[in-house]
Image (tube, helix red, strand yellow):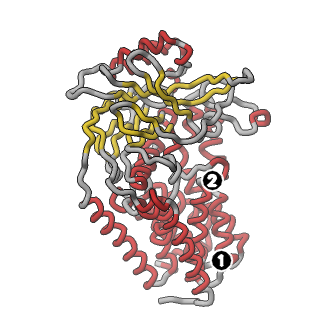
């Protein structure tokens, strides 16, 4: 098997590496065919064992990254198409993936430059890949979307309660790459590592018993198309859809109705008439939690625009507000706007401004919760305030941008990991898929599918009785794995073979 692959490398290495990277997309949601990640990364690492020039390794790694990112992130281009900027779609479908491909390019280049032993090279590759995944959460405001830990199902994902998604990604990179080492001992180690992930996750899930708070809530998913969402001629009809779904009979008294991000695309703090109309959807003695842009006038008369979560009571008063603090580049603001020369994808020409960071909201008869808007929930370790742990997290989003693609499925799978890490249920309200109720083990109890119109009535799950290791120590497990990889790289620096 190895010899034919080697010959193919010699003739078509660029094509093979791009295809290998693209195959990895099948390991992520909605497919979760992890075997394709094993093929892709083992081919990449085996290829690295045949190289001795860092420059060649750089461009081979970049080609792998191009295939990997185009296949995984093609859906970003849909965000331009949905607002009739189709001519900019290549920015999301090709240019951005090609830029992201420099992460694996640097990894492969340094791996070859710093090591000569294949065994040492494997651990260096795992170390540098893992650090690369961590850097994706920080560089250019961060986009930690395609972390390798996300290829797993809920059983293996239980490990994130201890070492977080970065730690699980670090272990995953070893598991999916180790065949390329051609060391039976290391391959056996990878098999045992996977077996431990599966067995440990299965045991943890078997010990969990769902407990509920007795607080009944409703998620509403109106599935308003992105083109109609911000058009004033559709405003009344769209708002009436939200209200109609909210006022349908419930089996048990509801404490709150939850709408999605920007479900009401108007500055409702300035329009009491709109707020009065919305109050018809509020259950007796309860609240409505919705998404709406806000216009903030500062003391110096300057104006800021923010994407916000608002809580309204039966009289239309705004009881609480959270302003999104981690904004989406090009979606909510244009970096270097004067240079780039085009407006953001959301309505209006002005950039949005970030809020002051995540915070909790406390309402009478509602357990303490942390609102997270859109992709704020993808940032591991940054989803709850440090001073006070909430009883639940609420993620409002709008995935209508991405159409019929893997994007909404990937987004759901990513945010469910925050529930496992924090041991806290996560309630997700999406304008257009996928809304869900997720327990503190990351299990999806209820969901509304992409393009589905409807609602979910549910009893709010309780968080775990004890804090998870991750919620107490955050990324400690990840950094311990990094130290281990670094020591193993040095230990086997002069070992040419380990059978």
* Residue with the mark numbered 1: 51
For the residue labelled by badge 2, is the local secondary structure a helix, a strand or a loop? loop
The answer to whether residue 371 is left or right of residue 139 is left
Picture residue at 57% right of the left edge, 56% below the top: 67
- In the rendered image of this protein, does residue 181 appear above or below residue 44? below
- In the rendered image of this protein, does residue 308 appear above or below residue 108? above
Residue 215 image offset from top left, x and y in percent: 28, 35
Residue 107 image offset from top left, x and y in percent: 64, 67
Residue 352 image offset from top left, x and y in percent: 64, 31
In the image as oriented, which residue stretches furthest toward the top?
273
Picture residue at 61% right of the left edge, 78% below the top: 50
Q: Nearer the viewer, residue 455 or 357?
A: 357
Q: Which label belongs to residue 138?
A: 2
Badge 2 or badge 1: first in the primary sequence: 1
Q: Which label belongs to residue 292?
A: none
- In the rendered image of this protein, does residue 380 appear above or below residue 50? above
For the residue labelled by badge 1, is the local secondary structure a helix, a strand or a loop? loop
Quadrant of the rendered image containing residue 55: bottom right
Tell me if residue 6 can be seen.
no
Q: Nearer the viewer, mark 2 or mark 1?
A: 2
Picture residue at 49% right of the left edge, 64% below the top: 167
């Amino acid at each position: 098997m190895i010899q034919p692959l080697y010959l193919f490398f010699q003739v078509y290495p660029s094509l093979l590496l791009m295809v290998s990277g693209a195959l990895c997309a099948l390991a992520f949601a909605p497919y979760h065919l992890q075997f394709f990640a094993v093929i892709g990364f083992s081919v990449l690492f085996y290829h690295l064992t045949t190289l001795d020039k860092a420059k060649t390794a750089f461009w081979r790694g970049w080609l792998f990254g191009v295939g990997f990112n185009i296949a995984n992130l093609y859906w970003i281009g849909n965000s331009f198409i949905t607002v009739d900027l189709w001519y900019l779609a290549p920015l999301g479908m090709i240019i951005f993936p090609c830029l992201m491909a420099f992460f694996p390019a640097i990894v492969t280049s340094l791996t070859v430059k710093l090591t000569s032993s294949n065994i040492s090279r494997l651990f260096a590759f795992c170390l540098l890949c893992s650090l690369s995944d961590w850097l994706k959460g920080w560089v250019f405001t961060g986009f930690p979307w395609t972390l390798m830990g996300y290829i797993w199902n809920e059983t293996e994902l239980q490990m994130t309660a201890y070492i977080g998604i970065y730690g699980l990604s670090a272990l995953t990179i070893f598991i999916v790459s180790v065949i390329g080492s051609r060391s039976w001992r290391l391959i056996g180690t990878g098999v045992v590592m996977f077996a431990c992930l599966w067995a440990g996750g299965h045991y943890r899930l078997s010990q969990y018993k769902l407990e509920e708070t007795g607080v009944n809530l409703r998620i509403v998913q109106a599935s308003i198309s992105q083109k109609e969402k911000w058009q004033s001629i559709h405003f009344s009809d769209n708002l009436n859809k939200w209200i109609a779904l909210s006022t349908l009979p419930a089996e048990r008294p509801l404490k709150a109705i939850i709408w999605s991000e920007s479900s009401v695309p108007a500055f409702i703090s300035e329009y009491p008439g709109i707020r009065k109309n919305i109050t018809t959807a509020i259950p007796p003695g309860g609240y409505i939690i919705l998404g709406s842009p806000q216009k903030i006038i500062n003391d110096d008369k300057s104006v800021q625009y923010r994407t916000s979560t608002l809580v309204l009571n039966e009289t239309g008063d705004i009881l609480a507000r959270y302003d999104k603090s981690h904004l989406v580049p090009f979606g909510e603001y244009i970096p270097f706007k004067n240079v780039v020369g085009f407006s953001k994808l959301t309505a209006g020409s002005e950039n949005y401004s970030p809020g002051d960071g995540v915070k909790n909201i406390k309402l009478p008869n509602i357990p303490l919760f942390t609102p997270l808007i859109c992709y704020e929930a993808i940032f591991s370790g940054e989803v709850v305030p440090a001073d006070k742990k909430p009883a639940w997290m609420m993620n409002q989003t709008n995935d209508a941008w991405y159409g019929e693609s893997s994007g909404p499925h990937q987004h759901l799978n990513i945010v469910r990991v925050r529930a496992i890490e924090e041991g806290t249920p996560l309630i997700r309200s999406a304008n257009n898929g996928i809304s869900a109720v997720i327990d503190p083990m990351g299990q999806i109890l209820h969901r509304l599918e992409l393009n589905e119109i409807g609602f979910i009535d549910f009893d709010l799950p309780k968080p775990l009785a004890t804090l998870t290791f991750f919620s107490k120590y955050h990324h400690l497990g990840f950094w311990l794995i990094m130290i281990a990889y670094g020591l193993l790289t040095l230990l086997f620096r002069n070992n040419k073979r380990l059978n």
